[in-house]
Image (cartoon, rainbow, N blue to C red):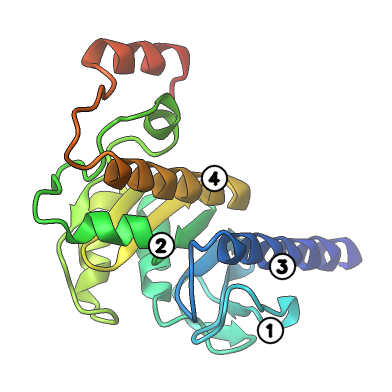
Amino acid sequence: MTAILSETTKLRERIVRLAELLYLRGYVHGTTGNISVRTDEGIIVTPTNSSMGMLDPARLSLVGHDGRPISGDKPSKETFLHLAMYEERASSNAVVHLHSTHSVAVSILADTDPENALPPLTAYHHMKVGRLPLVPYVRPGDMRLADEVRQRAATYHAMLLANHGPVVAGKSLEDAVAIAEELEETAKLRLLTEGRPVNALTHDQLAELDHHFPS
């Protein structure tokens, strides 16, 4: 039992450390953004109205796999987005949702491709993020948003919510954070090159990546 508690404590500390990293990098601001990790006992998720730069490991929320609160502070009001991802992705054990500036900017551009919001500008974007669908706008807190996410989650581990921000799932906490970071940096590249011709990766180059780095 002591070993289990110790591992849970370490996991909570990792969540806080990586949340702070995202905050310091400017990927979240104010009380935006949330992180969750799936465990045997339930889902640990950052609390509602909390700053990702000032979390307390002991006060992180624990909810059941059905979303029922178990312990800790009141869970993020966007926990339902995380649950929708977990329901469709058995291999995913962590979800990161950000309101990161460049990704949100891409999500509000009128010419953003709803089938793939970001072009494959770099190999690492293709390997980590892949195809990125744009989820139609739904008011935050509206359960219709969970339905929209759920419809895409079985196929895509990352998606961009229109006028809102990205949601990504990963095999581990570190994996999900790395995907979210790569997504935001690619969004930044997309905006930096706006209006200029770019050499996005070709179909053959993408196929070569898929051959050497299968997902």
Residue sitting farthest toward the left:
110
Q: Bin the neighbour count of mark 2 within 10 Å (Cα to Cα): few under 14, some 14-19, many 20 and up.
A: many
In percent of width and height, residue 35 lies at: 53, 66
Please report whichever mark, 3 or 2, sits nearer to the chain's N-terminal start: 3
Give coordinates of residue 168: x percent, y percent: 41, 53
Give the class, few, some or many, for how many residues have Cα within 10 Å of label 3's Cα (few <14, many ≥20). many
Neighbour tally class for label 4: few under 14, some 14-19, many 20 plus, Cα within 10 Å: some
Residue lying at 48% horizontally and 74% vertically, measured from the top left: 29
In this orientation, does residue 130 appear?
Answer: yes
Residue pointed to by mark 2: 100
What amino acid does circle 1 point to? Answer: Arg
Q: Secondary structure at mark 3?
A: helix
Label 1, secondary structure: give it: helix
Query: Above or below — where is 42 with respect to 111?
Result: below
Q: Is residue 197 above or below residue 35?
A: above
Comparing marks 1 and 2, which lies closer to the viewer? 2
Q: Residue furthest front?
A: 196
Residue position for label 3: 12
Q: Nearer the viewer, mark 3 or mark 4?
A: 4
Which quadrant holds residue 209?
top left
Question: Nearer the viewer's eye, disc 4 or disc 1?
Answer: 4
Instruction: Name the secondary structure under disc 2.
Output: loop
Which residue is tagged 4?
178
Report the side of 53 relative to 80 (left or right). Answer: right
